[in-house]
Image (cartoon, grey):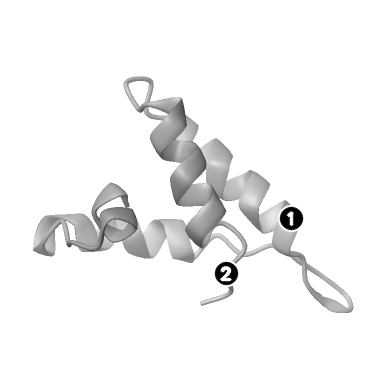
Amino acid sequence: MYGKVTGSSGGKECRSAERAFFNIIKKYKHGFRPQKTADARNAFLLECKSADPIIISKIISKFGRLRS
């Protein structure tokens, strides 16, 4: 995901992780919930204990609320 923030790509080996990130979508009966989606995606990224919180914040601010 960091590669996407910086404008590059992580290559083929990162596609499954990117897909998992974008597959996290929170909804309710009236539709998409952007903040709940961003919170769930943030929790997903925080599972990596070595991840830099500043980088995670940048990823969430750019891609956290997107519905893909």
List x then y, in percent, for residue 29. 88, 75
List x then y, in percent, for residue 10. 15, 56
**Vertical placement of residue 65 versus 17, above or below:** below
Q: CA distance from mark 2 to mark 1?
A: 10 Å
Q: In this view, which residue lies farthest toward the front?
A: 6
**Vertical placement of residue 24 versus 68, above or below:** above
**At x 37% / y 28%, what residue is drawn?**
48
Query: Pointer 1: what residue?
Result: 35
**Which quadrant holds residue 25?**
bottom right
**At x 57% / y 69%, what residue is drawn?**
66
Query: Pointer 2: what residue?
Result: 66
Q: Is residue 16 left or right of residue 46?
A: left
List x then y, in percent, for residue 3. 23, 54
**Which quadrant holds residue 55?**
top left
Q: Is residue 9 left or right of residue 28?
A: left
- Label 1 sits on a secondary structure element that is helix
**At x 29% / y 48%, what residue is drawn?**
2
Amino acid on which the number 2 mark rests in the picture: Leu
Q: Is 1 or 26 nearer to us in this picture? A: 1
